[in-house]
Image (cartoon, grey):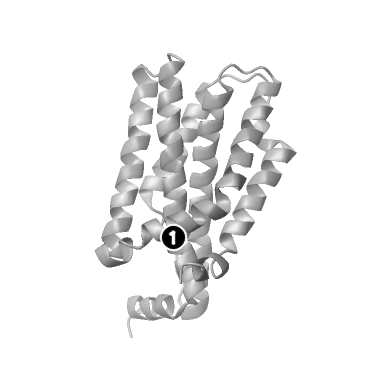
Amino acid sequence: MKSSEIIKQATDSLDDGIRSNYVFGNIFLYDVISIHITELKSKMQQAGILHHENKKQVSNLEKSINTGFSKIREQMGEKAYSYTPVFLEKFEDEFSNKLKVLFYTIKREYDRIKQPLSEIIAHLSMIYLLAGFEIERTTWYAGKVQEQSRVKLNAIYDQSIVSIRNISGQLLKKIPVKNHYPMKADEIKAAFEVFEKELNECKIEILQKTA
């Protein structure tokens, strides 16, 4: 049997909770990232900094997230994709408050040093963190398939999300914050770790509610 066939069998035989969490959890992350990209563009425009290179970078963020959604839809097929609104609503109900806590924890840290673009930086930071989380989840899922198939499997990252991670990181570096690294602040790390852990562990609990 070809290694590709073994991997497909392994993927198909994975626990439904793991597979569903990975697929619909990723769609949820894409959806949240998309919301923050929209907010970022609006806030940058209001602040008068959506011009030249910034405008181009934000446009690339929009293109990347739209490409990502298109790939997911194509890979899932229309029938499976039609269930996404139901799952997104469940994830939203479960995690919206935790994401708000994370966002305002980041913003508060920048407000503390009187950074005038604190809200813009908070949206950018959310995009950067969630894109990184999405990449980590791909590594984790590849490991699960490898365990099941016993075939060495390298994680294949969606270049759309890699692009979003890189662009948001570049934009963060362009905003001057003197000798301050709030992304390393304990409160931010704690809030993000809570969200990471609970999303990764929700595979059965939340999904059963849709039955």
80 or 136: nearer the eye? 80
Task: Say above or below: 88 vs 16.
Answer: above
Extreme residue in the top direction: 48
Q: Which amino acid, by three-letter code, is at mark 1?
A: Phe
Res. 46 image quadrant: top left
Density class for disc 1 (Cα within 10 Å; few <14, some 14-19, many ≥20) is many
Tell me where residue 34 appears, x and y as whole percent: 41, 41
Q: Which residue is mark 1?
A: 87
The residue at the point 60 percent across, 53 percent down is 196
Residue 146 in picture, x, y percent from top left: 49, 73
Q: In the rendering, at what x and y percent does residue 7 appear? A: 39, 76
| Residue 79 in sight in this render | yes
Q: Position of residue 55 (x, y in %)?
A: 35, 23
Q: Residue at x 54, y 65 (%)?
A: 206
Q: Visible in this render: residue 150? A: no
Give the farthest residue toward the bottom.
Answer: 1
Q: Tell me if 19 is positioned left or right of 104 in this view.
A: left
Q: Quadrant of the N terminus?
A: bottom left
Q: Is residue 183 above or below residue 9?
A: above
Extreme residue toward the right, this view = 186
Q: Secondary structure at mark 1?
A: helix
Tally the numbered discs: 1
In the rendered view, tell whether residue 9 sits above or below residue 134. below
